[in-house]
Image: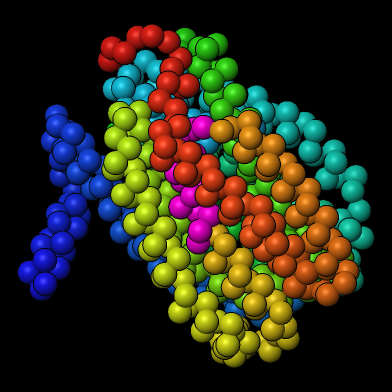
Amino acid sequence: MIKEQIDKFKTIVKYFRLKPFDVSTIQGEEAERHRRIAISAISGGISQVVNYSVMLIMVPLLLNYLGKEQYGLWLTISSMASFAVFSDFGIGNGLINVLGKANGLNNRKMAKQAVSSAYIAMIVISAIIIIVGVPIIINVDWNRFFKIANPATAALTQNAILIYFIFFVVNIVLSLIVKIRMAYQEAYINNVFLAITKVLMLIGCITGKLFEFNFIYFVVVLSGAQCLTGLINTMFLMTQSRPWLIPKTKYINKATSIVLLKTGVFFYITGISAVIATQIDTLVIARFLGAEAVPTYSIPLKLFMIVNILITFVLMPIWPAYREALTKKQLGWVKKTFFRTMLFSVIINIIPLITLTLFCPKIVKIWTGEALEIPLSLLIALSMSVICMSILNPLAMLLNGANVFLKQRAAIAIIRSLVNLTISIYLVNRIGISGPVWGTVICQGLISVPISIYFMKQIFKGRYDGNHLDCHNTKTKN
């Protein structure tokens, strides 16, 4: 028994190395796939340790320096980042599947066409968003919308939203590098840049407090850091690791663009659904209860999401790995990997959720120095939501990699989004701050989980797509 466990441990450990495996055999391909997942998981874990270490410092720093209202306003503004799924029409996620297929076929021409087409599309989309969005931001009374009472905060609201919006749009283009790295199972490089981003944010915030800068400075630092590291990551890819992927107009391909848009529309719709299931809660609370109420929801949420986000960094590299494996008809590896990740995702959440449900208010008091009145119903709702996500996240990676049932999933996502938003608005007015979270839980438990499990069973019966993403018939390396 002990010898068997030691052998299993040795099998796992062998994947944690920098040197690639020989991929000339199926066994080598599977080993290399596991290696990339392993190093991405390790780097993701380290990155998230840095992320949450920075968060532990920054939350009380910003809350105490800015005050509840300005900090709540920042949380509300920054939740707009989740609406990136609206702005790129799903092209970024569609690019993952196209490049995953190109990688499985060893087809550089397809990859060049996909990357060039995606960047041109994103630049055009970003320009349109700027042209349409800036006049809207300038003409909306945001202080009234978010119920800002403090005159000092009210004087800064519009400029803060405008600055964040501009950085946000720039990052739409720069964020494509994250998708490209994911497609080539190089999430570990993204993780390094994420850790650097968080450190830059922390240094900027500490500097701002020391020199007593105002709210606008913090908006620039917290939103600009991601753009800076995204630019550096892009330059590193295009000049060092894969210079042949540099976007060029001659590589823009109509067929590839159509594939990106068709696949992207699905991710666009499901992305909207994901936003409504998560970040929309922040906006609903800010709109109906005021920006000052947001920290009472958002700070516990950060604690509840720690383990789930750590798991997500383990799962994300599996999406393109599924895509590659299914392209090569290696369904056995996909099944084995899926059930292992599902079991891991659910079990690892249990103890942290019980602990937070019982002791969250005390932990928040020790952490921030603020005695927030956190309702038990909110804590229970957050626990239930995390449990649902621990089931849905592994399922999402499988479904995305399989690239099937796109129309059905898109239609279901629209229905789920509308139901979720309607229930959340109804419940926030009936039971208060926990209402939007319970709205999300209801939709996850009654719609998302059972339907995703049904699609999973269909995939394991052999209904997965290995051909939809073909942009042309050539399979030669160019």
Res 416 visible: yes
- Range covered by the magenta-colored residues: 390-404
Q: Can residue 195 be seen in this view?
A: no
Relative to 453, say whether 76 is above or below: below
Quadrant in which residue 78 is drawn: bottom right
Could you tell me residue 340's position as x and y percent? 34, 57
Residue drawn at x 82%, y 74% is 432
Name the residue rendered at 75%, 73% in the picture: 434
Give how far across and how far down residue 344 sits, in percent: 38, 63
Type of colouring: rainbow
Relative depth, front residue between 26 and 205 = 26
Judge whether residue 92 is colored magenta.
Answer: no
Quarter of the image for the N terminus: give it: bottom left
How many numbered circles are shown? 0
Residue 217 relative to residue 107: left or right: right
Q: Residue 136 in the image: x percent, y percent?
A: 85, 41
* Percent position of residue 476, x then y: 28, 12
Magenta span dominant secondary structure: helix
Image side of residue 394 versus residue 330, left or right: right
Residue 448, above or below 438: above
Q: Is residue 13 above or below residue 60?
A: above
The residue shown at (52%, 82%) is 354
**Position of residue 462 in the picture relative to residue 173 (left or right):** left
**Is 397 in the magenta?**
yes
Q: Which of 30 and 157 is in front in this view?
A: 30
Q: Which residue is most to the front? A: 461
Q: Which residue is drawn at 70% across and 76% down?
A: 378
Q: Identify the image quadrant of the C terminus.
A: top left
